[in-house]
Image (cartoon, rainbow, N blue to C red):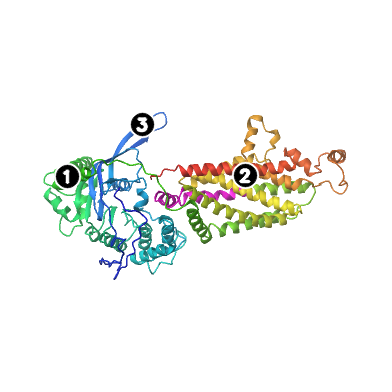
Amino acid sequence: MMMEPVNHINIVVMDNISTNGMPRPKVVGTEEQPKQPRGSTVSFHNINYKVQLKTGFLCKRTVTTKEILVDLNGIMRPGLNAILGPSGGGKSSFLDVLAARKDPSGLSGEVLIDGAPQPPNFKCLSGYVVQEDVVMGTLTVRENLCFSAALRLPTSVPQTEKQARVNHLIKELGLTKVADSKVGTPLTRGISGGEKKRTSIGMELIIDPLVLFLDEPTTGLDASTANSVLLLLKRMANQGRTIIMSIHQPRYSIFRLFDSLTLLVSGKMAYHGPSPNALDYFSNIGYSCEPHNNPADFFLDVINGDAGSNGVCVSKENNSDELEFENQKGSRQNIVRHLLDCYKNSSYYRDVQSELQRIVQTQPNHFRTTFSFNYNNSFFHQLRWVLKRTFQNLLLDAQTSVSQVVVHIFLALVVGAIFFDVKEDQSGIQNRMGALFFISTNQCFSTVSAAELFIIQRKLFLHEFISGYYRVSVYFLSKVMADFALRSVTSVLFSIVIYFLIGLKTSVEAFFIFTLTVTLLAYTATALTLAIAADQTAVALANILITITFIFMMIFSGLLVNLPSIQDWLSWLKYFSIPGYGLAALNINEFVGLNFCGESVTKNANVSSLMLNCSASTPALTCTGEQQLDYLGIEFSTWGLWQNHVALVVMTLIFLTIAYLKLRFLKKFS
């Protein structure tokens, strides 16, 4: 395997760095370390990629195969390699194939790195900057880079060297002024788009990657900012890095920076060679670019049939719009066919084929060796850093943390005022049942916000997991622990406020059992929310599914319907009701030992005499809390209380397992 180890550290000292210039760096190194970053040569052989499209309903569903990439061959050497083409031409798919981030089903051909097969962990050895920047917005630029260094560089690298690499990248990327500024979120202002893009690039450069891939890095940037980002990439390419990027329609000042150009049309290669020679090549095959025209625009015009070519274009002198459309369609097909034929007959194609043949012959017995994938850091090292970032994000995101605390306290005050100082009489039974029912259902519905836990940061998670930052279990545990910590705080504050306002049973033991039950309810409901939302992509859909589930659970909680009276073929649903277990535990904790028949009933009377006295005078009254629990079908023994707690714990573990499995088996290729 002709690949450099990923744990080497190159500290580069640069003079006269400018964000808009391209000076050659002055490099200071040791004999053990290379003087400059060494890029790898990427060769691709007979790349074909197909996808299956399903249309129609279940009974009449048809499956069609669509070709995305067709017979692509070529070489990407150290420098700035651009993949150009119209929308839907296969640029991003081709980039993902080269970066080993495409679903292998439907993919054929081989990609070699320095003449050797890609190892399974090539995604971790290379850098990949996605089209939409995925950077934690609540952290600063420096904190994001430190996070990448801590997880992508092995523990054998001293912390001082990691910090030195972070400081060097901040300087090299022109981020010194905003190094300690927050990246920014949709609700809080942060750094500019160009600075965010450079931060994303910096997080990939931490490992000094063999190859740096970028998916349309100018998306969402203005012309000046896009130009500065490309000048940065050009400067890095001049230092010896291999940079491969897809780009849609660059301006001329960007186009002239490319060293190599690959032009794709309908997934096929129309040109692959030096970028400065592209205009001469097109001129030789009959397509001349007008003076002062942008070459990138000119290439797209040719593909779309908007440029003339020695009799290839079809005349559009017909007044019929329909016929003109057909002419344009036929013209474009003829032009594409002409471009593909010309390239296959060109010297560039022959040179590439001979070079690819030489690469294969130098490694005559190369085959895909089986590698065991190992992370650079241990499980607990990853957990410490991911958990630290998760708690930082939680504390700095006021919408997630502070608002939930405020809402819970507000609801506790409102409900406490409504049921303030309940009495031990017949009205007290109804008020207690109503208050405890609201508390149990509120703890369920308040956890709907947890649906966003995996959905909002889904792209960030997929990118970091594929790039080898951490294990799925690390990310899952950190998210669950942080959210459970927030639920614990809100549940305790909610319990303190509402318990004493309502005036529930005055016992220290009863208060702690109440708080424990409310907290367990929040945990179980959160686990169910995560289990439903883990594989969803839209928050709105997840919220609908979660709300419907809790509504059905609420019906079988024991207040709206008398559970003993439900038909046998429906009674089993009560065993899946989270608020049902919580309400039962809260009822047992509150009602056992209470007397609602006034002073005429002695405290030493047993249950049977109590019922006799009540039935003789006021037969419609419920005199004891035990009677109420018996009517509700609740076992009010000590074991009856704790078995509800055990049920909540077991359900929490089951739902968390489902959520983890859903997260674990998400498609790794998007």
Q: Horizontal and vertical percent for residue 355?
A: 18, 46
Tell me if residue 235 comes above or below residue 278 in the rendering.
below
Specify whether residue 548 is in view: no
Main SS, magenta region, reads: helix
Looking at the rendered structure, the kind of residue marked 3 is Thr
Residue 188 numbered mark, or none: none
Question: Disc 2 or 3, which lies upstream in sequence?
Answer: 3
Label 2 SS: helix
Q: Horizontal and vertical percent for residue 519?
A: 63, 50
Q: Horizontal and vertical percent for residue 99?
A: 32, 48
Q: Which residues are magenta?
A: 443-471
Residue 8 sits in quarter: bottom left
Residue 62 numbered mark, or none: 3
Question: Disc 2 or 1, which lies upstream in sequence?
Answer: 1
Towards the viewer: 145 or 253: 145
- Figure quadrant of the C terminus: top left
Residue lying at 39% horizontally and 51% vertically, measured from the top left: 467
The residue lying furthest to the bottom in this view is: 16
| Residue tagged 1 | 354
Question: Disc 3 or 1, which lies upstream in sequence?
Answer: 3
CA gap between label 3 and label 1 equals 42 Å
CA gap between label 2 and label 3 equals 45 Å
| Residue tagged 2 | 649
Specify whether residue 367 is in view: yes
CA gap between label 2 and label 1 equals 65 Å
